[in-house]
């Protein structure tokens, strides 16, 4: 159940992040994220494997551990869900580059909600990792997508 939920939420979050990023780009203009620039710079199979291992594996676990299991849970002990989610999501967004703040904030809110309901680092890490993996795979297969 945890695996299917994590993957399903990750796919849904990827769609949500693309929709928000496109809306943001329509308003303020497109600014490629450093992730897109970096992935395009080493578009090889070994580069993809490294991106997937670190970006969809290590980073997803570490970010979920810090932003949801530690920060969100700490805030949640002291305040209502919506405030704890907003504060941890704002910090999550600030930790990413400015051009991605809005979509990353929305992702943080959804991941906080998932953690609130499941209390599972692994479900959250799988959702986050799925989102990152889709991005890396599409950037590898369709390099002009991020331009």
Image: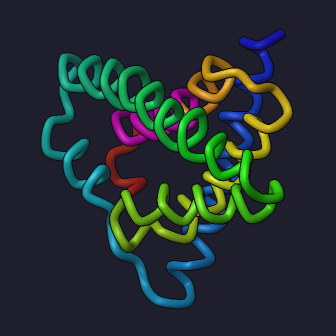
In the image, residue 123 sits, relative to residue 137, either above or below, namely: above
Magenta region: 129-141
Q: Quadrant of residue 100?
A: bottom left
User: Who's the residue at 78% across and 45% down the image?
Assistant: 113
Which one is nearer the viewer's eye here, 62 or 29? 62
State how many labels appear. Answer: 0
Q: Is residue 137 magenta?
A: yes
The residue sitting at 68% across, 43% down in the picture is 111
- At 46% from the left and 30% from the top, the residue drawn is 60
The image quarter in which residue 138 lies: top left
The answer to whether residue 99 is left or right of residue 125 is left
Please report the residue visible at 32 percent of the width from the left and 61 percent of the height from the top.
Answer: 33
* Residue 123 place in picture, x, y as percent: 68, 21
- Quadrant the N terminus occupies: top right
In the displayed structure, would residue 134 be above or below residue 49?
Answer: below
With respect to residue 70, does 72 lie above or below?
A: below
Main SS of the magenta part reads: helix
């Amino acid at each position: 159940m945890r695996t299917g939920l994590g993957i399903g939420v990750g796919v849904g979050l990827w769609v949500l992040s693309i929709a928000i990023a496109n809306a943001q780009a329509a308003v303020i203009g497109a600014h490629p994220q450093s992730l897109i620039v970096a992935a395009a710079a080493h578009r090889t199979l070994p580069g993809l494997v490294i991106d997937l291992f670190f970006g969809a594996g290590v980073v997803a676990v570490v970010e979920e551990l810090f932003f949801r299991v530690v920060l969100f849970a700490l805030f949640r002990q002291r305040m209502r869900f919506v405030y704890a989610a907003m504060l941890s999501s704002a910090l999550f967004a600030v930790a990413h580059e400015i051009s991605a703040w809005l979509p990353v904030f929305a992702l943080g809110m959804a991941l906080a909600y998932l953690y609130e309901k499941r209390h599972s680092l692994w479900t959250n890490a799988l959702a986050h990792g799925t989102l990152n993996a889709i991005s890396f795979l599409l950037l590898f297969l369709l390099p002009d997508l991020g331009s």
